[in-house]
Image (cartoon, helix red, strand yellow):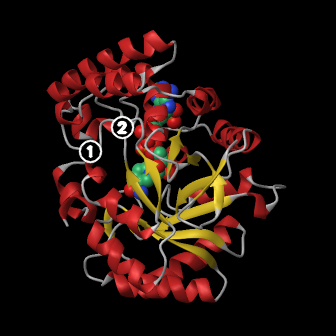
């Protein structure tokens, strides 16, 4: 596995990371042993960057990761943790808290659940509009100085907020949705992070599975992903037309649409690290093939013509969530 810098002069991590969110029920039931086997298979393949959040399964995801990493040299993995998302006992999201006290308290719990004495990169999952970003970052910097955290990260934040954060402390990574279907970061966020030397960990690289041939067509009303506008009735029908166009390009190259979509994200630059989002070993193996797909300019043009961002039907989150995203509103 090729290694790359996360952020200019930043830590060296694998060219792709593994996102663990789906292993804690966010997209429906997950098989615990298969999830752990997937993490171990990722490590065997050379993946070092593992992405979790304390609110993924209300701690479940971190405990799962701790179990999967038993016997693994701590220094061989790069664990990044999101915090701030608040959930009630039913699992409903009820708010976001990135106050300095919450930074420290959440971190303390994460360290115990993960069974580690430091986290490689710690990041607020969303901007807490009640708290100046300088205060959130200031508290993380205190934790860096105390040795509990190695690097500062941000998630789904707009260019102005990223600049304000970077004025307090170097930002190592920005986590944000980026795929053939979600190209919003190209206008102002990507230029800003490139100027500042902030790396990107790209999530939603398959637009929650929409860019893969199998799963999108199987999504019924009971699938938790059905809440996303892109998976709803007429939108889904139109988006499946785009997928069919992408399939034609993938067939021509002898690869799957998921592999092509991941290869496209990889082609955006070495500073963009795609997060593979799966809880299954077979899909991890499928995704890893993308690392060996070099796309010519003609192929890139054909891919972008098959899935023009302007033709995608439906926003990436529902209207309430979109309004709460600093990356979409600032
Ligand atoms: N910062 C943020 O706001 C934020 C938000 C969301 C996610 N994330 C992070 O990013 C990671 C990835 O995000 P994501 O999972 O939403 O993105 P994604 O990769 O676009 O979508 C993952 C979905 O696609 C399915 N899938 C994966 N490979 C497939 C294949 N080859 N064929 C068919 N279906 C396939 C997965 O199901 P299976 O698991 O069953 O394979 C899962 O339901 C998460 O794990 C999390 O760590 C961050």
Residue 224, given in percent of the width and then of the height, sits at: 35, 39
The mark found on residue 328 in the picture is none
Residue 53 vs 211, above or below: the answer is: below
Residue 255, given in percent of the width and then of the height, sits at: 51, 17
In-image side of 278 versus 79 (left or right): left
Q: Marks 1 and 2, how far apart in space?
A: 8 Å
Q: Residue at x 64, y 80 (%)?
A: 148
Q: Which residue is drawn at 43% across and 43% down?
A: 268
Distance from mark 2 CB to nearest ligand 1 atom below 8 Å: yes
| Label 2, residues with CA under 10 Å away: few <14, some 14-19, many ≥20 | many
Residue found at the far right of this picture? 71
Residue 105, given in percent of the width and then of the height, sits at: 52, 82
Residue 170 vs 9, above or below: the answer is: below
- Mark 1 highlights which residue? 316
- Mark 2 highlights which residue? 207
Residue 253, given in percent of the width and then of the height, sits at: 48, 14
Please state, as top left, top right, bottom left or bottom right, where the C terminus lies in the image: bottom left
């Amino acid at each position: 596995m090729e290694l790359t810098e996360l952020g200019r002069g930043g830590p060296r991590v694998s060219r792709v990371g593994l996102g663990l969110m789906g292993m804690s029920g966010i997209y429906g039931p997950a098989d615990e042993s298969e999830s752990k086997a997937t993490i171990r298979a990722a490590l065997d393949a050379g993946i070092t960057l593992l992405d979790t959040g304390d609110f993924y399964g209300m701690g479940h995801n971190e405990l799962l990761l701790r179990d999967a990493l038993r016997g693994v040299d701590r220094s061989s993995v790069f664990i990044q943790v999101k915090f701030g998302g608040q959930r009630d006992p039913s699992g409903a999201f009820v708010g976001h808290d990135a106050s300095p006290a919450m930074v420290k308290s959440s971190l303390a719990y994460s360290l115990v659940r993960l069974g580690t004495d430091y986290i490689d990169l710690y990041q607020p999952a969303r901007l807490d509009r009640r708290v100046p970003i300088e205060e959130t970052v200031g508290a993380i910097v205190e934790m860096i100085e105390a040795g509990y955290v190695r690097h500062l990260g941000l998630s789904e934040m707009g260019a102005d907020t990223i600049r304000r954060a970077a004025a307090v402390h170097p930002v190592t990574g920005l986590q944000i949705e980026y795929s053939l279907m979600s190209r919003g970061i190209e206008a102002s966020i990507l230029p800003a992070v490139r100027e500042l030397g902030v790396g990107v960990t790209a999530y939603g690289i398959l637009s929650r599975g929409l860019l893969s041939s199998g799963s999108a067509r199987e999504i019924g009303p009971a699938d938790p992903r059905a809440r996303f506008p892109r998976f709803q009735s007429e939108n889904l029908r139109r988006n499946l037309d785009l997928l069919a166009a992408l399939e034609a390009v993938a067939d021509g190259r002898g690869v799957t649409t998921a592999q092509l979509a991941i290869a496209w994200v990889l082609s955006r630059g070495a500073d963009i690290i795609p997060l593979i989002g799966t809880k299954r070993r077979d899909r991890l193996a499928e995704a890893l093939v993308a690392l060996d797909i070099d796309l010519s300019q003609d192929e890139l043009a054909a891919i972008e013509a098959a899935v023009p961002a302007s033709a995608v039907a439906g926003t990436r989150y529902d209207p309430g969530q979109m309004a709460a995203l600093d990356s979409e509103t600032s």
